[in-house]
Structures are given as C-alpha cells and as structure tokens.
C-alpha cells in the first residue's frame, strides 16, 4: 500500500530562529511556530518545531524573527534523543520543503480587522499603445 506524508501549517514564530551548520557545511535552522485552531478561538495553540536546510535555512535565519508569520509545507518525522537520567525522549518535527514568509498581521489588516486592499482609480490608468505590446 502506498503512503503519503505531507503537512501544511501556518503560524507565528514563538522565538527567534536557531541557525547552525553541520560539520559537512549544511545550514540547519530550527524554527518553532505556534499554530492556532481556526475553529476554537480560545483553544491552546499547537507548538511545532520546523527544520529547514541549506539556502532555505539561511534565509530563515536572516529574515525571520519571533512573531514572524510563516506558511510551511513539509513532511512529518519523529526525532528521538536521550534526555536527563537516560530517559528516551521523542518529539514530532516538520522537515520543511517550503517556507513562505508572510506579512505581519498588522500589515494585512486595517484598523477594523478587515484585509487591506489597495484601490486604484481606474480613470487614472493610461491605456497602452498597441506598439508597446510585444506580440
């Protein structure tokens, strides 16, 4: 039987990203995000660790900060390690295939809680000359 492992999340960073480099030179960035339940507004957010690699990791380290909004597509994996006292610990993580940087909430909304839409006065648009069209 075939299997499918894809996860899509949208949320905000709970802290600044952690960018590091593996001995091989591969950039690795840990991004922790909080994802809110769109149905239950008062529900506790889901906290998810996202791993980014290579150029994407470097971009995350350079441009993202605590509170940044992101849209993540990736696959789910379980990370395991030995904690204090030799106790085996596990945590689900998302290995990012793409991370899109979203505008801040304040940039997307007007003061009334509605999405901004830039309006253009159609009467001020100059018509194109047929010679300007390349085909």
Image: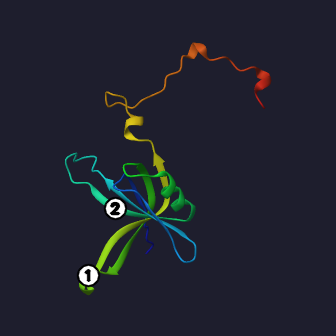
Residue marked by disc 2: 48
Residue 32, located in which quarter of the rendered image?
bottom left
Could you tell me residue 116's position as x and y percent?
Answer: 42, 29
Quarter of the image where the N terminus is located: bottom left
Quarter of the image where the C terminus is located: top right
- Where is 127 relative to 95, above or below? above
- Where is 78 relative to 51, above or below? below
The residue sitting at the right extreme is 131
Q: Kindly state the secondary structure of the residue where label 1 is placed.
A: helix
Could you tell me residue 3's position as x and y percent?
Answer: 43, 71
Residue 16, located in which quarter of the rendered image?
bottom left
User: Would you call the spot at circle 2 few (<14 residues within 10 Å), some (14-19), or many (20 or more)?
Assistant: some
The circle on residue 84 is: 1
Q: Kindly state the secondary structure of the residue where label 2 is placed.
A: strand
Could you tell me residue 93's position as x and y percent?
Answer: 38, 67
What residue is at 26 percent from the left and 81 percent from the top? 84
User: Would you call the spot at circle 1 few (<14 residues within 10 Å), some (14-19), or many (20 or more)?
Assistant: few
The answer to whether the residue labelled 2 contacts the one labelled 1, judged by CB atoms less than 8 Å apart, is no
Residue 44, located in which quarter of the rendered image?
bottom left
What residue is at 36 percent from the left and 74 percent from the top? 78
The circle on residue 72 is: none
Count of numbered marks: 2
- Where is 58 relative to 67, above or below? below
């Amino acid at each position: 039987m075939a299997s499918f492992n894809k996860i899509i999340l949208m949320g905000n960073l709970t802290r600044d990203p952690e960018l590091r480099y593996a001995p091989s030179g591969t950039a690795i960035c840990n991004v922790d995000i909080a994802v809110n339940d769109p149905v239950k507004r008062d529900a506790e957010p889901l906290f998810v660790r996202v791993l980014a690699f290579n150029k994407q990791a470097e971009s995350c380290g350079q441009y993202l900060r605590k509170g940044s909004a992101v849209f993540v597509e990736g696959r789910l994996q379980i990370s395991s390690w030995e904690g204090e006292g030799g106790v085996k610990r596990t945590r689900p993580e998302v290995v990012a295939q793409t991370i899109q940087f979203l505008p801040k909430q304040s940039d997307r909304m007007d003061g009334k809680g509605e999405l901004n839409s830039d309006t253009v006065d159609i009467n001020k648009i100059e018509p194109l000359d047929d010679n300007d069209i390349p085909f």
